[in-house]
């Protein structure tokens, strides 16, 4: 395959004919993918989602370029000396698509040596209907014929660089350069748009394209006026899973609701918090009614004010709206949400695991749907999957449960001081979830309880992907924690793995540590995760208080 200037040919997976894909690590200059991610993050941070009713109220008078919003995949075209590939924010590199070959030819004829063009990969349907993201997924991820590849188009809306120089020109010049490079193309072309001079012009184009022609929305760009995404609000029917109460002068009133959608197997996939759209009367009335539905739960979450949600029996369905639904982080990764199983006989929620879902931007309560029930037919995950890509949405969550962790070592030490019993405990386990990005391979958890201290309970966690290194971290913690006077409790092993110092203590009463291992190096071995420190990121799968889901806009 071609494009050796940009991607390692040996790492490309052939999909059909000349079309192939690879991961971003196959790029000859891997820094290019970092630049793509940075651009996407900056774009997301600048773009303000608006309801069409806010156009005149929130958009200042200025010159704007208004373009049709396409339901596709954010993509950057990388061009270098006659060769071209594309890469999306998730790190998928594509080569050999007809539009990419057309782009390489056009840019070569324009005399360019290098360029990075930003746009939307979308599908042109034969029936004239508006294409959705599912059409892109079907056509370029699992193509069934050459016709699928031919229908893939690329609409360019910005330039990142031209001939090795970062592009920083005003919008008028940017649009003119894009027209010069790809204007009139068959499968690659400038995104369709028009210039307007004020909010009224924006409103007119919205009515024509969105209300009249059922376009997904519009994107408004201005050098001085800002960047806006204007779309009809999404309407969703969701199940109420929990609630929190207001504080201070809002005590006795509902603060917000924790809601989810139902997967096909009936499990509840948490989606977002809803705190806006309620009247004060509804906040008082709903709180009283929901308190009658409170149940137990293995899962706990807190709201933005760090107040714990009270979980409720899944019986309420409400209608909410949102300005936008996002399925990926700004780095292109999945947005994982907790999935719960409702155990009706026990009247409690059980944790299944986190799975990809989405974020709802600016969710607001509309009304209770007393005509609907907490059933997949009435509050389905399909409402989300029909708008954005949701991996594994059609699979049973119960069948995707992660493996249980295995306890490898457990040691407990006690010491009396001034009549009070102090306890120090170390537990090491193998997560058996190394293949999942949220988990390290091994974890050591240290607990220090001293009732005479101002803060009686202290904890420490260390993680690693190496058994050798986690053993070193265990020894390091043990060396600091257990000195003279501490007594090890016999039988405090774990997981059927006997500790090397089982049942032995020093003659002076201090616990004897396991035989020392070589100290962990400051740098990990190739392919290993770094050892845990105070800034360690992985979340160990312990039976501790779960973290609250992130707020959705």
Image (cartoon, rainbow, N blue to C red):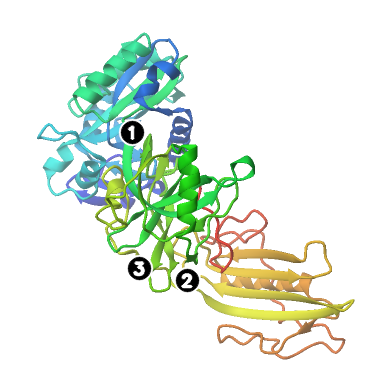
Label 1 vs label 3: CA separation? 32 Å
For the point 49% across and 43% down, the residue is 283
For residue 398, the mark is 3
Q: Say which label, 1 or 2, has the lower sequence index.
A: 1
Q: Say which label, 1 or 3, has the lower sequence index.
A: 1
Seen in the picture, residue 553 relative to 300 is either above or below; the reply is above
Residue 477 visible from this viewpoint: yes
| SS for callout 1 | loop
| SS for callout 3 | helix
Label 1 vs label 2: CA separation? 42 Å
Give the residue number, with chain letter if any, for mark 2: 432
For the point 28% across and 20% down, the residue is 206
Residue density around tag 3, few if under 14, some if 14–19, many if 20 or more, within 10 Å: some
Residue 305, percent from left and from top:
59, 46
Residue closer to the observer: 125 or 118: 125
Question: What is the count of numbered marks?
Answer: 3
Labelled pair 3, 2 in contact (Cβ < 8 Å): no
Give the residue number, with chain letter if any, for mark 1: 233
Residue 19, percent from left and from top:
22, 44
Residue, far right: 418
Residue 99, percent from left and from top:
22, 33
């Amino acid at each position: 395959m071609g494009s050796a200037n940009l991607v390692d040919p040996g790492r490309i997976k052939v999909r059909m004919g000349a079309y192939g894909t690879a991961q971003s690590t196959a790029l000859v200059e891997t820094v290019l993918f970092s630049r793509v991610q940075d651009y996407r993050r900056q774009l997301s941070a600048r773009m303000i989602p608006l309801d069409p009713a806010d156009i005149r109220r929130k958009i200042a008078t200025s010159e704007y370029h208004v373009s049709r919003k396409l339901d596709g995949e954010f993509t950057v075209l990388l061009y270098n000396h006659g060769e071209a590939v594309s890469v999306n924010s998730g790190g998928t590199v594509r080569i050999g698509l007809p539009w990419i070959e057309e782009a390489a030819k056009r840019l070569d004829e324009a005399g360019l040596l290098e360029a990075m063009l930003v746009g939307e990969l979308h599908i042109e349907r034969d029936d004239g209907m508006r294409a959705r993201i599912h059409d892109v997924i079907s056509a370029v991820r699992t193509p069934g014929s050459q016709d699928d590849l031919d229908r893939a188009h690329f609409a360019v809306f910005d330039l990142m660089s031209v001939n090795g120089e970062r592009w920083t020109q005003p919008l008028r010049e940017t649009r003119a350069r894009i027209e010069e490079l790809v204007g009139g193309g068959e499968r690659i072309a400038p995104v369709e748009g028009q210039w307007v001079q004020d909010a009224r012009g924006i409103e007119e184009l919205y009515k024509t394209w969105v209300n009249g022609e059922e376009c997904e929305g519009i994107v408004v760009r201005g050098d001085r006026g800002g960047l806006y995404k204007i779309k009809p609000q999404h309407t969703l029917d969701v199940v109420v899973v929990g609630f929190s109460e207001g504080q201070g002068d809002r005590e006795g009133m509902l603060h917000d609701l924790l809601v989810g959608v139902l997967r096909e197997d009936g499990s509840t996939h948490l989606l977002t918090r809803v705190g806006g759209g309620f009247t004060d009367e509804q906040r008082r009335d709903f709180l009283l009614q929901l308190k009658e539905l409170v149940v137990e739960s293995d899962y706990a979450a807190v709201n933005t004010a760090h107040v714990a949600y009270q979980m409720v029996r899944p019986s309420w369905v409400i209608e909410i709206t949102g300005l936008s639904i996002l399925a990926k982080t700004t780095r292109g990764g999945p947005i994982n949400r907790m999935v719960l199983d409702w155990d009706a006989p026990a009247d409690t929620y059980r944790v299944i695991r986190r799975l990809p879902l989405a974020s709802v931007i600016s969710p607001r309560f509309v009304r209770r749907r007393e005509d609907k029930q907490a059933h997949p037919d009435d509050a389905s995950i399909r409402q989300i999957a029909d708008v954005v890509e949701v991996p594994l949405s059609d699979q049973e969550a119960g069948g995707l449960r992660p493996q249980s962790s295995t306890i490898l070592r457990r040691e407990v030490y006690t010491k009396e001081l001034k009549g009070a019993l102090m306890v120090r405990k170390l537990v090491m386990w193998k997560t058996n979830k190394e293949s999942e990005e949220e988990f390290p391979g091994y974890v050591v958890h240290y607990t220090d309880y001293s009732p005479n201290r101002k803060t009686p309970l202290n904890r420490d966690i260390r993680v690693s992907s190496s058994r050798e290194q986690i053993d070193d971290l265990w020894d390091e913690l043990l060396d600091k924690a257990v000195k003279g006077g501490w007594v090890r409790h016999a039988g405090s092993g774990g997981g059927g793995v006997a500790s090397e110092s089982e049942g032995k203590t020093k003659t002076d009463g201090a616990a004897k540590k396991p035989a020392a291992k070589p100290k962990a190096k400051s740098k990990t071995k190739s392919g290993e995760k770094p050892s845990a420190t105070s800034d360690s990121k992985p979340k160990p799968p312990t039976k501790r208080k779960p973290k609250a889901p992130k707020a959705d806009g």
